[in-house]
């Protein structure tokens, strides 16, 4: 059945790419994808097979369907066996959701509270919002070991590592201190940041990124992680020349970019 669901094929392709970049070792990382009406209509049965209660309120997304990866599941296995490694859930009411497809002998990611809270928050700022991807991006984790957790500082550094950064994430990047993963606390803290950012760093853990499509969200992760990689390669070297505030302002003006103010201006 999964073969007929084009969106599942596209999702597992991205999960593969994330795995092969080395950002989702073992069961590291998770994904949730909001289905639109057309995609939902392609699923042969939307009958709820199992109901699960939550500790958090999902009022704003009741009735919506999401593809979610399973807890403990490996991204590298999703393509060859989607129905055991991911599935589709329906938000039934404020405090319960149901599994309608896949997730055979499994249940959704332990980071579901953060995913759903981020969907709720991002939908408030962008009605086209669709995706939340969590991954263990190596260089972002490296940076969080050596740099103070000041998000304006992080934004300035990442913007100045390569010309494209300010174009791809003009709003900057959110940064959270280490918080126990898998619960409501980190979910609330992440979702709060998502009011202003599409990407939030979890110190010593990884990244949460959001977007309107698989390409856009994956592209955001790639660009942020590449900037972090450049930083980690040069941070202990003598810098001879770099991108200046004036250069960034020039880019912003040329490409009509509405960037976060108060950092380079
Ligand atoms: P899950 O296997 O529950 O998705 O958890 C992986 C992870 O990255 C936790 O932060
Ligand atoms: Zn994680």
Image: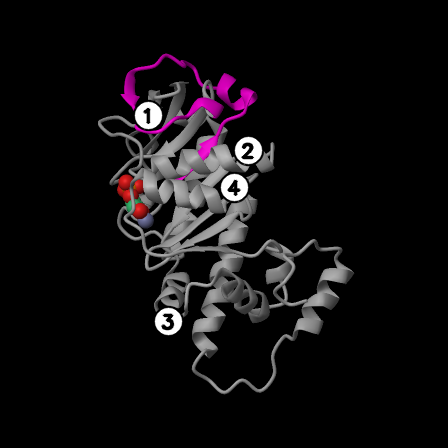
Residue 113 % position (x, y): 35, 35
In this view of the protein, which residue sits in the foreground, 101 or 139? 139
Q: Name the residue under label 3.
A: 146
Q: In 3D space, how far apart are the residues under numbered discs 1 and 3 (Cα atoms)?
A: 41 Å
Q: In this view, does 152 lie to the left or right of 32?
A: right
Q: What residue is drawn where x is 48% and y is 24%?
A: 60
Membership of 53 in magenta stretch: yes
Q: In this view, does 142 lie above or below 190?
A: below
Q: Name the residue under label 4.
A: 214
Q: How crowded is mark 1: few (under 14 residues within 10 Å), some or many (20 or more)?
A: many
Q: What residue is drawn where x is 30% and y is 40%?
A: 183
Mark found first going from the N terminus, 2 or 1: 1
Q: In front: mark 2 or mark 4? A: 2
Q: In 3D space, how far apart are the residues under numbered discs 2 and 3 (Cα atoms)?
A: 33 Å
Mark found first going from the N terminus, 4 or 3: 3
Residue 38 % position (x, y): 56, 21
Mark found first going from the N terminus, 2 or 4: 2
Element marked by disc 4: helix
Q: In 3D space, how far apart are the residues under numbered discs 2 and 1 (Cα atoms)?
A: 25 Å
Element marked by disc 1: strand
In this view of the protein, which residue sits in the foreground, 240 or 22? 240
Residue 216 % position (x, y): 56, 46
Q: In 3D space, how far apart are the residues under numbered discs 1 and 4 (Cα atoms)?
A: 20 Å
The magenta stretch is: 31-60
Q: In 3D space, how far apart are the residues under numbered discs 2 and 4 (Cα atoms)?
A: 16 Å
Please state, as top left, top right, bottom left or bottom right, where the C terminus lies in the image. bottom right
Q: In front: mark 4 or mark 3? A: 3
Q: In this view, does 201 lie above or below 83?
A: below
């Amino acid at each position: 059945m999964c073969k007929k669901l084009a969106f599942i094929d596209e999702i597992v392709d991205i999960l593969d790419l994330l795995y092969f970049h080395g950002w989702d070792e073992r069961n590291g990382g998770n994904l949730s994808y909001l289905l639109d009406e057309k995609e939902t209509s392609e699923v042969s049965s939307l009958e709820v097979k199992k109901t699960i209660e939550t500790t958090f309120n999902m009022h704003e997304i009741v009735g919506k369907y999401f593809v979610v990866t399973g807890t403990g599941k490996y991204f590298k296995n999703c393509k060859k066996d989607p129905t055991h490694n991911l599935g589709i859930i329906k938000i039934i009411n404020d405090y319960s959701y149901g599994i309608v497809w896949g997730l055979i002998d499994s249940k959704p990611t332990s980071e579901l509270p953060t995913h759903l809270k981020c969907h709720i928050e991002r939908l408030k700022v962008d009605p086209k919002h669709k995706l939340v991807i969590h991954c263990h991006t190596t260089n972002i984790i490296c940076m969080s070991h050596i740099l103070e957790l000041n998000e304006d500082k992080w934004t300035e550094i990442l913007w100045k590592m390569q010309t494209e950064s300010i174009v791809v994430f003009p709003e900057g990047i959110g940064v959270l201190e280490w918080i126990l993963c898998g619960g409501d606390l980190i979910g609330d803290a992440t979702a709060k940041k998502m009011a202003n950012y599409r990407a939030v760093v979890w110190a010593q853990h990884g990244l949460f990124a959001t977007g309107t499509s698989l390409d856009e969200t994956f592209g955001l992760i790639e660009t942020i992680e590449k900037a972090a990689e450049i930083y980690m390669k040069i941070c202990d070297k003598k810098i001879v020349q770099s991108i200046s505030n004036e250069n960034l302002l020039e880019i912003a003006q040329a490409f009509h970019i509405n960037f976060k103010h108060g950092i380079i201006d």
